[in-house]
Image (cartoon, rainbow, N blue to C red):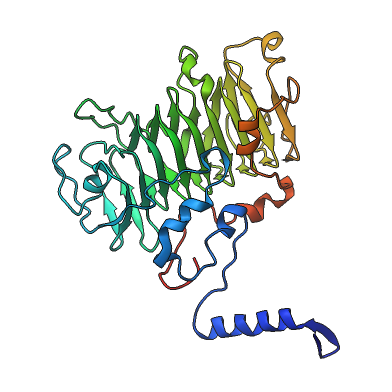
């Protein structure tokens, strides 16, 4: 069915959509716009807060299939305090994160959490900040060590400090998020900034990780994928880096990769200072549909930095570019050949959109402002 309005032809579908938008506007509700496949899976559902665990079905990349806390109880953080590392108080984030059972962790209200010790998230957990403004600030970051099947969503971690560990767990050396010897980990819609070391480290045999829809800012060494060249256990690592925004206040490691297989897809790189992506130890890096905007003359135009290796060596490493957009003189120096993907790698790949679509795909990177009862 079609109707004419002032000479224009309007389909019945578009007319209904227009009326719906007017109704939303009168009620003070913003129309939902979801710009990438992960967000389209859940953001435009007004009842997302009634069915929070459906978020787990939206994971893409190598973390796809993680069930996290789905099927477990909802645990609500009511208390932002953090006193006893080994005997945490019920109602705190630490208490929920340490339980040895599946939990979906949400927050009763806006809160700033200043940690006394590094918290360790145990297996089968989701930390879901939707519907509240949740900051972990002026303290250590979160550690996922020898645990699996975890989602961290909608958390702002900033002004990270070096902090002692406890009970045999690793201390925080200044990372906002540490993932060590872990698998099936999805980090989505987080905002990470300002610490003395890395913002997000994935190391020591970790694999099946997706980092998506995050905003990284005000930092030097941003994302490390692979501990160092002596940790050959990182050869199993498979990581997806998708739909993230790296701001012009970032210097390097977006990410820095070793040994493993990495899909870096549809991210926005806004004027790095030292380099955007770095590598050593013969990783396979597929750079696909990213937008690389080089900084001004005083900083390098090169996207890549290959560390501790001669050109005669790294020219054989598979570092490929597909549908990337290079702006303001950015230079991408591809090497190797297009790799033959295993069935597992093929299943973990995210479909590539052109780099010209990146500003839209990443427009909502970072923590979202979600209101219960409305599309997010």
On the image, the x and y values in percent for residue 275 come to 60, 30
Q: Is residue 312 left or right of residue 77?
A: right
Give 98 or 70, whichever is nearer the viewer.
Answer: 70
Residue at image x 62%, y 54%?
A: 36
Q: Is residue 164 left or right of residue 275?
A: left
On the image, the x and y values in percent for residue 154 come to 42, 53
**Which image quarter: residue 164?**
top left
Residue at image x 53%, y 86%?
A: 26
Q: Work out whether 67 lies above or below 250.
A: below
Residue at image x 65%, y 44%?
A: 266
On the image, the x and y values in percent for residue 331 come to 73, 31
* Count of numbered tags: 0
**Which image quarter: residue 192?**
top left
**Which image quarter: residue 206?**
top left
Q: Work out whether 3 lies above or below 349.
A: below
Q: In which quarter of the image is the N terminus?
A: bottom right
């Amino acid at each position: 069915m079609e109707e004419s309005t002032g000479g224009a032809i309007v389909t019945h579908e578009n007319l209904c959509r227009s009326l719906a938008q007017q109704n939303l506007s009168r009620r003070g509700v913003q129309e939902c716009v979801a710009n990438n496949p992960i967000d389209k899976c859940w953001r435009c559902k007004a009842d997302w807060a009634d069915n929070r665990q459906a978020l787990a079905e939206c994971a893409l990349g190598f973390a796809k299939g993680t069930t996290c806390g789905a099927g477990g109880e909802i645990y609500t953080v009511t208390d932002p305090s953090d006193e006893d590392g080994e005997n945490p108080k019920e109602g705190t984030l630490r208490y929920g994160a340490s339980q040895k059972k599946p939990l979906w962790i949400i927050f009763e209200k806006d809160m700033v959490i200043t940690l006394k010790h590094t918290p360790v998230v145990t297996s089968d957990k989701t930390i879901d900040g939707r519907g509240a403004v949740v900051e972990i600030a002026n303290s250590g970051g979160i550690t996922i060590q020898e645990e699996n099947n975890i989602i961290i969503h909608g958390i702002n971690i900033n002004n990270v400090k070096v902090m002692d560990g406890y009970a045999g767990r690793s201390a925080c050396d200044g990372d906002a998020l540490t993932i060590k010897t872990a698998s099936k980990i999805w980090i989505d819609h987080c905002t990470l900034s300002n610490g003395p070391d890395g913002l997000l480290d994935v190391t020591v045999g970790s694999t099946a990780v997706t980092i998506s829809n995050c905003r990284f800012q005000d930092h030097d060494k941003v994302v490390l994928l692979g501990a160092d060249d002596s940790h050959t256990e990182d050869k199993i690592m498979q990581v997806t880096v998708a739909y993230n925004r790296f701001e012009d206040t970032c210097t390097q490691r977006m990410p820095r990769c070793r040994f493993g297989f990495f899909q870096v897809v549809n991210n926005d790189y806004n004027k790095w200072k030292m380099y955007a992506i770095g590598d050593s130890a013969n990783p396979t890096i597929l750079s696909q549909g990213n937008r690389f905007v080089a900084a001004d003359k005083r900083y390098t135009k090169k996207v890549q930095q290959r560390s501790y290796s001669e050109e005669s060596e790294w020219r054989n490493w598979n570092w490929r570019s597909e549908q990337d957009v290079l702006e303001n003189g950015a230079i991408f120096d591809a090497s190797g050949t297009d790799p033959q993907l295993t069935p597992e790698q093929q299943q973990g790949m995210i479909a590539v959109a052109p780099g010209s679509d990146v500003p839209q795909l990443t427009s909502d990177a970072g923590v979202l402002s979600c209101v219960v009862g409305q599309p997010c």
